[in-house]
Image: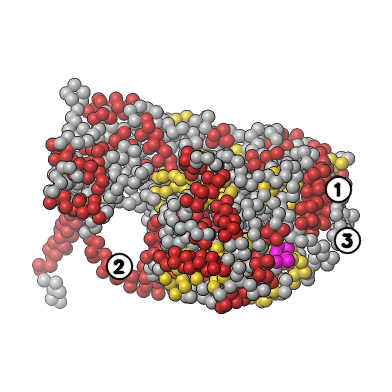
Amino acid sequence: MKRVFQHPEGPVTGKKYWRSLEEYSDSAEFKQWLDREFPDNASEFTDGQSRRSFLKLMGASMALAGIGSLAGCRRPEAYVVPLVKTPEWMVPGRALLYASAMPRRRGAQPLIVTTFDGRPVKIEGNNLYPQSNGGSSTFAQASILDLYDPDRSKTLIVEGVAKSNSEIKTILESLRNQLVASQGKDVLVLLDEANSPTQARLVRELQKQFPQINIAVYEPMMLAEQLNNAPKAIPRFEKADVILSLDCDFLNFDEGGLQSIKSFTDKRRVKNPGDPMNRLYVVENRYTNTGAVADHRLRLAASQVINFAATLAQKLGVAVPAVNGKPVPLLDLAANSFLNRWLTGLAKDLQANSGKAMIVAGAHQPALVHQIVAAINASVTAAPQAAVASAFTGLNIVQAAELIRSGKISTLIIAGGNPVYNAPNDLDWTNLQKKVASIGKVYRLGFHNDESSEKGLANIQLPMSHFLETWGDTLSEDGTLLSIQPMILPLFGGISTTQLLGALAGFAITDGPELVSETFKQVAGGDITSAWKKFVHDGFYSGARIAAPVAAGNVATVTPVPVQIDTVPLSPQSLELVIMADYKVDDGRYSNNGWMQELPDPITKNTWGNAALISQKTANDLNLKSVLEKGIYQSDVILIKANGKSLEAPILIVPGHADNSISLSVGYGRVASDAHGLRIASNLGANAYALRSSTNPYITTGVTVEKTGKRFDLAITQEHGSMEGRALVREGTVEDFVAVPDFAKHQGMDAHIPENISIHKNPYFENGQHSSIRPPVHQWGMAIDLNTCIGCNTCTIACQSENNIPIVGKEQVQNGREMHWLRIDRYFSSKRDASKIPLGSNLDEVIELDDTEMIFQPMACVHCENAPCETVCPVNATVHSEEGLNVMAYNRCIGTRYCANNCPYKVRRFNFFDYNKRPLDSLYLGPLADRPREDIEMMKLRSNPNVTVRMRGVMEKCTYCVQRIETAKIDQKVKAAASDNIKVPDQTITTACQQACPADAIVFGDISDPNSRVSEWKASGRDYSVLSYLNTKPRTSYLARLRNPNLMKEGAGFIMPDIDDVGKMSGGVGHHGGDHSAAHGHAPEGEHAHPTTPAVQPAGHRTPVQGGGNH
Amino acid sequence: MANFFPKWTNKLPVQILIGVVLIATFNVLGIWYWFTPKFTRVGYQPEQPIPFSHAIHVKQLGMDCRYCHSFVEVSGHSNIPTTQTCMNCHSHVQKDNPKLAVLRESHEKGIPIKWVKVHQLPDYVYFNHSVHVNRGVSCVSCHGQVNEMDVVEHVKTFSMDFCLECHKNPEHAVRKNEDVFNLDWKPGREQRQESLGKNLVHDWKVNPPINCAGCHR
């Protein structure tokens, strides 16, 4: 008889953690997801084909396979083909690492690229770089897939006809001759922001040779900065104890960057109780990574941030400049005591921490917000910031459009950008480009044959090389010069923007670094032979920075968008629209990248498309719904009207979103007429650029919405792998940690459960002791710090890249078949007492759910010592190693999926199809559908040779990067040779996720070594295991999240109104901390935790174990 | 009623049973022998594009394995020499030997030589040469007396059982590091393999992996 494990019931009072509104309302649909490892669609063949037609197809394909495989009875002859000449450095079978950098619009990321036999296969952060911890970003990790994108622009196309790439030189020569003849008068060059000193030098060279040439720079997500030509500034988070973010997502990879993430999270590594930790206040309209990490978060419409800033300035006694003679309206604090208390508490905290406090404002906020912030920073907080001037500036896109409109331009050279897709809609760029193409010539250097290279819009399309294929240089966030060196010759023979500019300036196109080394010579000066070698080897130049700080002291982060003060209040009839860069496809440049498309958005967990994000209340007001049916979110489609344009987009209700506000990310809704142009990107999501004007590029008010009556199926992974909310994520406040140093171990029902005693003893490692069976060496384990995890997803992509994990396509994600070994679970926690809103409440009435906190938890195989998966495998395909790994032998797996069914962590992934061998749109045809040969070749080039590529019918999961472990062990044994020094030193092995983490939130190592980093982390009081009452003894443990609320008091009560909700020990557990029998002397949280007025707050409330009460 | 079945059919069930047992036994034994690496792999001796003789180069001329297989000590993959390596000598020695025409052509035109792979492991097996040769496992343990072969032959089974046999009892194979590339080395009378191996396994903490992840990743 099947034994049903009775999980202990979760506590009734206190905080609830949930992933989706469906989970909160406990809908039948959600329960279905919960109860089964593989939901309906995932495990059954419910798709278009019936079982009968499936058998027919299979019969046919078996017959075909039979004919084909007769020749396979003999062992095929294999060959070893050595090179003719021995290349320098190359050792067959070993990786070669090179330093390089990925250019980004707000500062490049220093990288180390792993190459095997001359092909780059993995990208990592450059840990030689002084400000780097070796972390990287999702974009850097995924850019390796772009290199091998079979949809890349491969050949020269002249007037719609493909030509040989050898003609590129001739074309550029004739273009230069034309420049010489016209002196550049009628020529406009449109570049994107690469922060490249060499490109800047070549532009100066062009301007010198052809004084009348027009150079413009356009970067869609830097439009405001470019219109205002403002210097960049870097906030110094390492010096700030109190930070207020006004709609600034400084923990993403756009506005923020690796340096911000590192310096911010370094101040949150609380090792011992009482250690200092910074405090973050966030005011924003939608949840961002930054908002999720906040200690106090206020949801506020983005257009009201200016009013918030003005009100804060007034509280702090800082003067606010008037706009057109009118003062900035202040928030009505008298009517909103919550807001009043929030602002008061914030203002006092900023004042109290003068010199250690800092305010940052989002790049898409109006200039006035930045002025106010600068004023407060100068007078009150004295925030330490450093400013950096831009590398070079040209005309902006508006001026460029004006030039074309005036008819002065007959030759347009677009290098890199895609203005037809992403130029502001009021410029009518498509027609402008069409005009130039008809009267003159449009040259387009592009990575894809996309919107801007359509016939009729561009006369000549030149294939562009990837940054891994070319020489170059670029500047990091703080202006350090970084080198870009080629790992491989251009796969399809493209050229880079640098080479294009060089050719126009009269330099020959070569494969070598001449253009770059010339710039370096000017920077470094003198004899550069050894300096150049070091520059290329290390990846950065340690000498003077290129962009010297323009001013010391306090500078606004960025000075963008012109001010608007709207008098029309926001309402469901007049909403605001916020347009932002996407977490996955950025400004659209990664939209043909399958890894990024399939990556769940950190906040919404939406894949393969975007959606208009709104709050539950706004959805209720507008009568919009997003329902879970058959495991698929079906959302109402709305028509958004803004800036005189309209756009259809599906809605998505996100808890924590501001009311009367819509957030829509750019980068989707791409169309390419070329069938092989953008196979991944085409027809996904809505193109937010269509709503974007140059006057309102980010925040538009007065937006109206119409319900279209249509429904759209989203592919959201938030329900996938739900684990019934058994205190999986744990958090407390800084003072909880002081009061109960091991609070995390006693949350959930862990405090109630007697000690786990196994009958089975681990034969290799029990109670921290090695056994005598084998020579004791290593016992692997991992710890993940939830306090520094920012949920950025870089680990997920790094894992995908390292372990050859395929993508499965939108349809299969909807079926719950995504393959990511490492997922990031995102939990909302309701701020109010959960007992007040019982499970099963009607969602339409539960608008309080909009006030939530968020917490991330990376979840992969935890390598249980008593692994439930191992005992049920009928073929011993998953077994335990003596070093504590739960290993998976793919070749033994027969695909019963018992292991996945028995895994309480839901981390095993099954290959339902041959995702590598078949095109994603015809997976169901099985062997009858063949992926184009070129796609497969590209996949082979990209794959990590040290990891097996799995086939259909095989189970897989996180291996702790066993290939890296084995390589390190082998290297150590080789080093040991005739000695017994075989113990791998700590931190020699970094798993792909640990290596990639920009926040350094993951550590892996030998837990049998008490001095290893992982042992140190695990010794922390914050350490806990997920589902420890099952006695699975997971090797991956977590360090509980801490929050650092503002505990200032006014009279007897706390000033901050949300104080009861911030980081409250989860699951009503506070009173279960410490000794179990003693714990029952306390009142349940629900009885005294939520006073209606703070004045009646019991004094002992914040120190849970010492509080009194009857129970 | 007349007998429906004639009398000889009485023996039929027994005959069928014996037949089935015989066929089954034959199948099992047949698969046991002909489908296993003992039959499919051992003895494989393909013709190479150049009739290279290890016997001449190693046995007669006394070359070390590592002159050609130069990265065997540092890499998982034991490299086949590049044309350049061969030409180091053959630009002076045996310059006009017609057997080396392919080599000279490769050198002149830059076309790589397609050697036929003799020892081939499945793709899901990750074998590493460097760790074996640095920890006392000689080439001869897996490849046989290559130094005496005119044409390289597959002599060991390379089945999983073959690998595990040694991984479980490494003392049967390990020798001192200086003897690893000496394919003719035999344990001396005064020091038998058993005791030498046991000492080395203990002193060097030799613990070859016997879990799946050791070879399958």
Badge 1 sits on which subunit? Answer: A
Same chain letter for marks 3 and 1: yes
Three-letter amino acid code at the position of disc 2: Ala
Question: From this viewpoint, which residue is outermost toward the top?
Answer: B190
Q: Chain of mark 2?
A: A
Report the side of A575 relative to A210 (left or right): right
A82 or A395, nearer to the observer: A395
Residue B22 picture quarter: bottom left
Whole-number angstrom distance, CA of label 1 to CA of label 2: 78 Å
Which of A248 and A880 lies nearest the eye of the viewer?
Answer: A248
**Could you tell me residue A622's position as x and y percent?**
74, 70
Q: Amino acid at mark 3?
A: Lys
Q: Percent position (x, y) of residue A183?
A: 58, 66
Residue on which the image places disc 2? A65
- Dot 2 alpha-carbon crowd within 10 angstroms: few under 14, some 14 to 19, many 20 or more: few
Do pointers 1 and 2 mark residues of a single chain?
yes
Residue at image location 40% in from the left, 41% down from the top: A967
Q: Earlier in the sequence, mark 1 or mark 2?
A: 2
Read off the magenta span. A694-699
Q: Is residue A1093 left or right of residue A766?
A: right
Q: Is residue A399 visible?
A: yes
Whether residue A347 sits left or right of residue A1078 in the image: it is: right
Write down the residue under mark 3: A326
| Amino acid at the residue labelled 1 | Val
Q: Secondary structure at mark 3?
A: loop
